[in-house]
Image (cartoon, coloured by chain):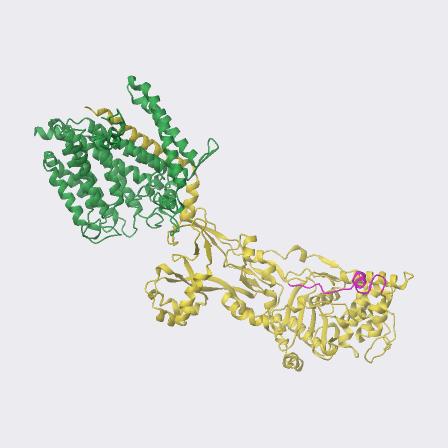
Chain colours: A green, B yellow
Amino acid sequence: MRKNKSVIGNFDWPLFSCYILLLLMGIGTVYSVAYNPEHPSIFDLSEKYGKQIMWLGISLFLGLLVFLIDSDIYRKFSLPIYGFTLSLLVIVLFMPAVNGARAWLGIGSMGIQPAEFAKIGTAILLANYLSVANIKQQSRKTVLVANAIILVPMVLILLQPDAGTFVVFTAFLFVLYREGVSYDPLILPVLNAIPIKGIHFKKTWVGTHFVPILFVVLFLSITTLLLSNSTITLDFLGVELAGYWGVFFFLLVLSVVGYFFMRMIFSRRDRKRALTISIIAFLLSVTLTKGIDFGFQKLAGHQKERIELVLGLREDPNGDDYNRNRAMAAVGSGGLLGKGYRNATVSSVQTNHVPESETDFIFCPFAEEWGFAGSIILVFLYIFMILRIVIIAERQKSTFNRVYAYSVAMIIFYHFAINIGMNIEFSPVIGIPLPFFSYGGSSLMSFSMMMFILLKLDSQRKDVLN
Amino acid sequence: MNFDSRKYVFIVIFVLIGVLYASKLFYMQVVDDTWKLRAQQIAEKRREITPPRAVVFDRSGKKIVANKTYYNLMMVEKNIVDLDTIAFAKLIGWTVEEIRQRFIDIRKGEGKYYNKHTGKTSSNYQKIRAYPFLKELTAEEMVKIASHLEDFRGFYKEVTSMRDYPFANGANILGYLSEVYQEEINKDKFYKPGGRIGRSGIERFYEKEFRGTKGVKYIVTSAMNNTVGSWEDGRYDTTAVQAPAIKLGIDIALQAYGEKLLENKRGCIVAIEPSTGEILALVSSPNYDPNLLVGNRKIRKNYPKLLEDPDKPLFPRPLASAYMPGSTFKLLQALIGMQEGVITTESGFPCNKSVVGCHNHPSARNVTDAVKMSCNPYFYAVTRRIIQQGKKKVNYEDAEYGLGRWAKYMHSFGLGHRLGTDITGLTAGNIPDPAYYDKWYGHLQWKFSTIRSISIGQGEVQLTPLHLANVAAIMANRGWYITPHFVKGFGEEGPKEEYTIKHKTMVERRYFVPVVEGMRRVVYEPGGTARRAKVEGVIVCGKTGTIENYRRQLKLRNHSAFIAFAPMDNPKIAISVFIENAGGGGGTWAAPIASLMIEQYIYGKVEPSAKEKRILDAVLLKKER
């Protein structure tokens, strides 16, 4: 009885409310998009909304189970759980392909996607590994094992192939960064192999901050390619920024915003460093992006075209139109207050202008129907949820809980950033669902389980010691 | 080591992305309009609805141009599933090979476009779009196909509207419709590819009055281009409005009767109501059934045949063919002579056959008799006096002055230029003036003797049968005319203003009296040239014309011409009849035809008679081959 009381007393209601809110908005949108006048009931199991409600019921049931099971079992059975999800990933490779990918286990629409559940398995094993007492952040073994835990499911997922989920698994790298796993053990041998007299590195800045640096470089590269190919018009200034100047402007804004943000959150002692950091970051990123831009322009025509195609910069020459253009039209046409519920013209399932508008492109009908007002609420909800998970993570006494919480935060963030980003030209078109929102049983169940495990771990945070 | 401060890296990333996404969303959804327009292009289609063209009624209220429903068999290639070509071929009565060819032709017909991005050329044809597989099927044809259509997925029927002519008469008046050309589409936004436009006749002249007002419907379409629903509940939709019915002055019964009379003859009849200028009938023979040129299918089949026919049925002779008027012209010479004061009503001239040939008759002692007997030497003398008035010392200058006066008079009768009739294809004809002969002979190089053949309506004088009918109307009105026109009203409105204005000739009413009396005697007195033109119960006034014509020095059979009006007082109908190469004189063929037309118009029917039978049986159209 004492334990139960503590569970409820320590339950994180803000996060749970956020989860429920997104679920309801998601089902509302699925109902709007897939509405079939012949089956008007939202509980009609022959329609997608009915099925989504069924999945929701199953998910809540799974959540209840999670709460009944003692949270210790995740730690104790982390390796079997991980192994189980991996084996599913192997089995799925022998299943018949659906839409060119062997991602489905089971029959037809009632099947599940093991890749969705592999995220949980990986998060648990990673949390267990990093929470082992006296783990060394600087050891070669740590960095290799931790990366291997992430890499094995990634390879299996790539074999399906499912590029979207593959990309999502890189979210775990950020968790390694949070836990201080250094890449120096991998970088130093290479660096020190260069015989320069008197210099022997023991620690590098790049190795320490390897993951964020890697992603900043990647992010800037993609941004450069995206921006240098288009012209940005600043109506209020009456300026057109063509080619690289767009990138330059973008970096300038980013640095200024970053500076003020750092001033806001830094302690008084560190505030003076904010200016230095933003200037250095600005100069470094300008150098980097100018280099990328220069290199890209030097590329041969067909190579350039390939990259542009992958990034969705160029129209698919075989298609009448391309998905992103349609998606952007749907989102952009929403206006300030939207066209009204069930009034989407571009992205409804009946018109079918936006493919997958109930799954991967579900943001389209939502943004079209609710406009900027709805979109900003949705963005706020996701950011709030992710930040809330970070707060939860940081209040954990146990490393296991923290690593797991960060994993959840990062995975939701990845899904959010890529899914919404591809509607607004901020990310390449990668088919991954919007958490709690998109139609689909596997994604709803796996995200729910992920969320309930987190809530359960958090509610018992005071029982755990390490 | 404690890495807790690294949480700020995460917080910064999350907040930054959130702000960035919100800003971009704000820009896309609120600031930038590009995507709203793009969305409209994608999903919200503006469909224009063309109303059926205005219907046409004749003067008695009979519908002479209607619209009829036709069907297109549409095809969406993407929706076609396992087409049983053999069964389909059997259904539409084609061969399998023809069906395959049709698919290829549709694809080819859409043309190609060049993609600047990829440098590739690809077809405009899209498998998801609807194309007409068979066009312009009649309801009967469609009924046979429609019941089996469910076996052939991807095919469906679509309704269109096309012209229908219940009377099959007046083709050259009504004209026909055909598909718009690209230049016409470029010039006027009303037209869209595949639309129809008036190509001749009043359909062309009154195109804007016929076409009506287009409706606009905003609809939401799917990626397959199918309609999903109306946009904003049709708040911005407008309905197509058909133009008000057009009422013609044509009497379709008279028109039909005229066409019947002219069967197997080459010629024209034009009948006008003198008091209003409304054209009652305008017959061009040989002609064609207007139903032959309805829709592309029939046009493609029939138009080349009609075009190549040596009798030129498409040619609107009464409007476009200028003939020498012959003796009908003498009426005008007499009027001008009196008005100019060079002769009086009682002037007599001997029938001197040494100056110009004539038939045997006593010399005319006054204008009235001269008209009755159509004496060539008499009008030769009259015209000589008009042209050579003796006001200038030099003969040549005198002729220049005289002809100048004469031409002005003629112009006041509507001759020598295009009458402003509401139809396309009018010809000006010719009234020679001094400038005209200067061009031929040189300035002051000609005098009356040079140009004398104009005195009896031969030589350079050229009038259309429409001009001649208008002259008849002027005679009936004793000195004025309203421009002959077809349309007497649009819905509730009357004709265009220009068709209500009286044009006065330069000849005073009093001079018409003796000439009109001469026209009566032409028909009713012994020695008159058109005794066959009598109509029971009304007094017909007429004037014959016999036009000699030659081709390559070979004398061909005379044209037979006759103009008339009736009744003498309070005239109801003015008419001109012109029969090409009929042989004989104006009284032989043209006059009896005119009298039958007058009878038909005044009594609404014609009693069978020997006269009618003679005309109906006559075959005056010699195939030239």
Numbered marks: total: 0
Q: Residue furthest left?
A: A1
B44 vs B202, nearest the viewer: B44
Q: Position of residue A401 (x, y in %)?
A: 16, 31
A385 vs B541, nearest the viewer: A385
- Quarter of the image for residue A427 reads top left
Where A129 falls versus B413 (above or below)? above
Compared across the picture, whether A346 is left or right of A192 comes to right
The residues colored magenta run: B425-445
Compared across the picture, whether B555 is left or right of A443 comes to right
**Residue drawn where x is 36% and y is 67% of the image:** B147
A202 vs B22, nearest the viewer: A202
State whether residue A455 appears in this view: no
Compared across the picture, whether A107 is left or right of B174 comes to left
**Residue drawn where x is 85% and y is 60% of the image:** B401
Where A29 falls versus B550 (above or below)? above
- Quarter of the image for residue A130 reads top left
- Quarter of the image for residue B249 reads bottom right
Q: Quadrant of the N terminus of chain A?
A: top left
Where B63 falls versus A122 (above or below)? below
Compared across the picture, whether B318 is left or right of A253 comes to right
State whether residue B449 appears in this view: yes
Q: Position of residue A359 (x, y in %)?
A: 28, 45
Is A251 in the magenta?
Answer: no
Is B443 in the magenta?
Answer: yes
Q: Quadrant of the C terminus of chain A?
A: top left
Q: Residue furthest top?
A: A269
Characterize the magenta stretch by its predominant secondary structure.
Answer: loop
Q: Position of residue A442 (x, y in %)?
A: 21, 44
Q: Position of residue B316 (x, y in %)?
A: 64, 68
**Residue drawn where x is 88% and y is 75% of the image:** B350
